[in-house]
Image (spheres, rainbow, N blue to C red):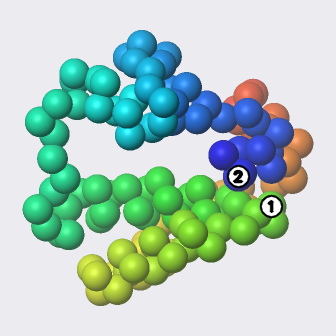
Amino acid sequence: MTVASSLGIRARTAMEWLKMAYDTTGEDLHEAIQNQPGYYGIKAPNTLSHRYIFEDVPMSMVPLASLGERFGVSVRGMDSIIRLACIVHHTDYWKRGRTVDKLGIGDLSVGELTRYVNERIRE
């Protein structure tokens, strides 16, 4: 949410997304998830060697954290999770993941990045 905000974007919260996608509500996120029948019976993986880590960390968390770092947002929480994943998997997800530099957008300003995303052009 903070990274999106630094780019002038108002991202949906998890609660808003659950309401939009599933028309589910609750007093808090836990209750909203529990109120969604589509999630019944889904359990967490029984191993740390799972795609939730080896795919989502380098392809989702690293780009978000890299974007946050680029625009001066504290990403200590995300960085901690990424570093733990690195330790658990003996893999440097920062090196392997999609950073803003690897995506070719590391030198763009917020305005240029917004234009690039909206118009798919780069000067």
Res 76 seen here: yes
Which residue occupies 73% across, 33% down? 10
Rendered position, 81 above or below 51: below
Tell whether 123 sits left or right of 16: right
**Label pair 1/2, CB-CB below 8 angstroms:** yes
Res 99 seen here: no
Q: How many marks?
A: 2
- Amino acid type at circle 2 is Val
Where's residue 4, x and y in %? 71, 45
Residue projecting furthest to the front: 27
Q: What label does residue 3 carry, if any?
A: 2
Q: Nearer the viewer, residue 16 or 91?
A: 16
Where's residue 63, x and y in %? 56, 58
Residue picked out by circle 1: 71
Tell whether 27 sits left or right of 88: right
Tell whether 56 sits left or right of 115: left
Mark 2, residues whose alpha carbon is within 10 Å: few (<14), some, or many (≥20)?
many
Which residue occupies 48% across, 36% down? 28
Mark 1, residues whose alpha carbon is within 10 Å: few (<14), some, or many (≥20)?
some
Which residue occupies 20% across, 69% down? 48
Residue projecting furthest to the top: 23
